[in-house]
Amino acid sequence: MRFNQIYALSLRHIYLISGSLPRIIDLIYWPTVQIFLWGFISKFFTLNSDYYSNTVGVILTAAILYDFLFRASISYNMMFLEEIWSRNFTNLFIAPIKISEIITSLTLTAILRTLIGLVPAAILAIPLFGVSIFKLGIPLFFLLLSLYIFGVTLGLLVTSGLLRYGPSFENIAWASLFFLAPLGCIYYPVEILPDSLQFVARALPLVHIFEEMRNILLNNSVNLFEITKSISISIVYFIIGVVIFYVSYFGAKEKGTLINMGE
Amino acid sequence: MFVQVKNLTKKFKNSIAVNKINFSIEKNKTVGLLGPNGCGKTTSIGMMLGLITPSEGEIIIDNKNLDKTDRVSFLSKMNFASPYVELPKRLTVKQNLQVYGRLYGVKNLEKKINEISKELDIKNFLEKKTGELSSGQKNRVTLAKSLINDPEILFLDEPTASLDPDIGDYVRGYIESYKSKNKITILLASHNMAEVERLCDSIIMMKNGKIIDEGTCEEIIKKHGRKNLEETFLKLARSNNEI
């Protein structure tokens, strides 16, 4: 074993990590998010062990809906990353296509990729676990719509980062959704969060979506106000996402990162 | 003048990549943009393609200022080919040409793909995935993409880099014949001096972000008392003083 060679190879990765803030954040971020998410889940089940006893499918329905959000966002990011990986980025941005058309195209294509992932999972859950997300009825469409808009918004924010900072922002693309998981109250009610975090969580559409999902499945009632609120909040974030995308695009043009992206 | 560049400048945080350059290109002429690595060629092309915002100066194409014109309208008249920019590897050659044909709003797209694939001899691998092609095949496909919209201005960045002499010669021959049959203005960035002498009506020499000389190949060779463009390039690239 030669120390110099071992050190040289380690140094190659140390240089890579120390020179890239997104990579450092990525290393810190995963354990932190896992601790937060599972900490809140554990706390909830310790305090309320009989909460879900009458509705076996609530957790699985939440998991499927969360996966829908995850797929929507990742689909959006993936389409953008594919252009970077294939070194096609410059070709795309010199084609006579408006930025609004790029956003619209990615948004519409993401639904296709998302549904390809969701539909089999939702159908499989019926015979395997006796759980059907379709029990949510017509509100399911609106909950999915809100999740989709928010998922695409997260995709927009990540692609804005990719535009501005290049491929090193890629790790954030994968991590973006897990960041919101603890605050999204996917598997537990918002009250389980500390008061200060509840305030932040309620500003996200996820809390309203998953609270309403639980309300429908556990109480057999539909709160239209909560659904409308979740869609409205998602739309506000989407508009902010579009603005940030444009700002990043012009920033990238200024910085010169649109040319030779991917290298 | 079809293309006019006035006082074009690009400043980055700690450097000036392009420093107040001025040049013009007549319609249907081919101009070579030469200079050592890092001299500002790619940044200049990037600004002309709307990928980089100039810090100062103007780019006027067909009497329209790029800064004040809708990007879609000017980009539809241009195209770009470079071996450093590729097409999606998992799509077939035909799918790539269909996507870009649609992006550029090409009418009778199937007919156009047929024509261009015959001309560039890519018909045999139209259904093959682009990532499975050899460098020479990829190069011709990239060229096909860059001509799909019959551009009025074509930017070529080292179009024959990494090609063997045979395929390099084929590509140069194709560009020559395409020029003779079509009305097209070409800005060619290249490090291959023989290629520049063969294809370009005139050249612009850049160094440290500035234009240090311009004229026809013969004029510049004669002016610097060298035998060919290669030697002239070396003299200009290695000289400390601006000419």
Image: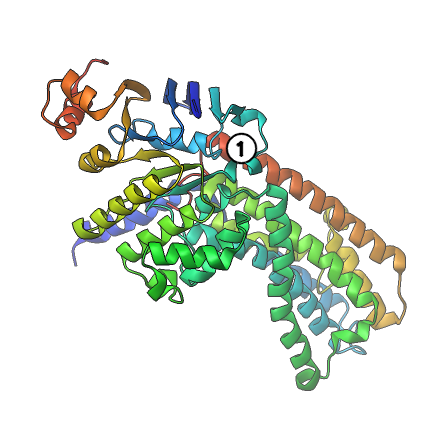
Q: Residue at x 35, y 58 (%)?
A: B118
- Tell me residue A198's x, y (percent): 76, 50
Depth order, front residue of B75/A50: B75
B8 versus A185 height, above or below: above
B157 versus A194 height, above or below: above
Q: Is residue A223 left or right of residue B152?
A: right
- Tell me residue A191's x, y (percent): 79, 56
Image quadrant where one finds the N terminus of chain B: top left
Depth order, front residue of B56/A84: B56
Crowd around label 1: few <14 · some 14–19 · many ≥20 (10 Å): some
- Tell me residue A67's x, y (percent): 64, 65
Depth order, front residue of A232/B77: B77
- Tell me residue B84's x, y (percent): 34, 45
Viewer can see residue B227 = yes
Chain ID of residue with mark 1 = A
Q: Residue at x 42, y 50 (%)?
A: B145
Q: Which residue is mark 1?
A: A251
